[in-house]
Image: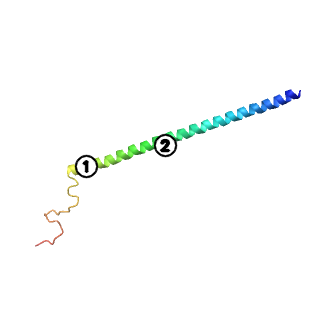
Amino acid sequence: MLYNLAHCCLGTLHEYEQEHTLTQHLYRDSWLARQQGKKKNRTIVCWCFWIFFLAFVAAIVGIIIWLVESGVLDNLGHRDDDDGHDGKGASSS
């Protein structure tokens, strides 16, 4: 009878340890899965950031090249008056 009682208690204890170990293992796996998911999300966000950043820089460079080719930026530093004077010197009247 004492044997059955000890076996019952030890059996219950053993089952508890197995269940507890299984719970810890599942928790560890779910934690690892969450960490791997976070890493994947960070990688995707990083790649998207760099792709959009490079596209933005390329668009700015393209616009500047287009403005230079079209002649819009040719007179950027010069402020010529309509009468041909540059506005710096005194006008002789």
What's the amino acid at mark 1? Answer: Ile
Q: Is residue 10 above or below residue 43?
A: above
Is residue 25 found left or right of 46 in the rendered image?
right
- Residue 13, percent across and down? 78, 33
Instruction: Give the Cα separation between the discs numbered 1 and 2.
Output: 34 Å
Query: Which residue is at a point 73% across and 34% down the rendered structure image?
Result: 17
- Residue 16, percent across and down? 75, 33
- Residue 19, percent across and down? 71, 32
Query: Which residue is at a point 67% across and 37% down the rendered structure image?
Result: 24
- Camera-side residue of 5 and 50: 5
> Tag on residue 65?
1
Mark nearer the N terminus (1 vs 2): 2
Q: Residues within 10 Å of mark 1 (few under 14, many from 20)?
A: few
Mark in front: 1 vs 2? 2
Identify the residue under disc 2.
42
Find the residue positioned furthest to the front. Answer: 3
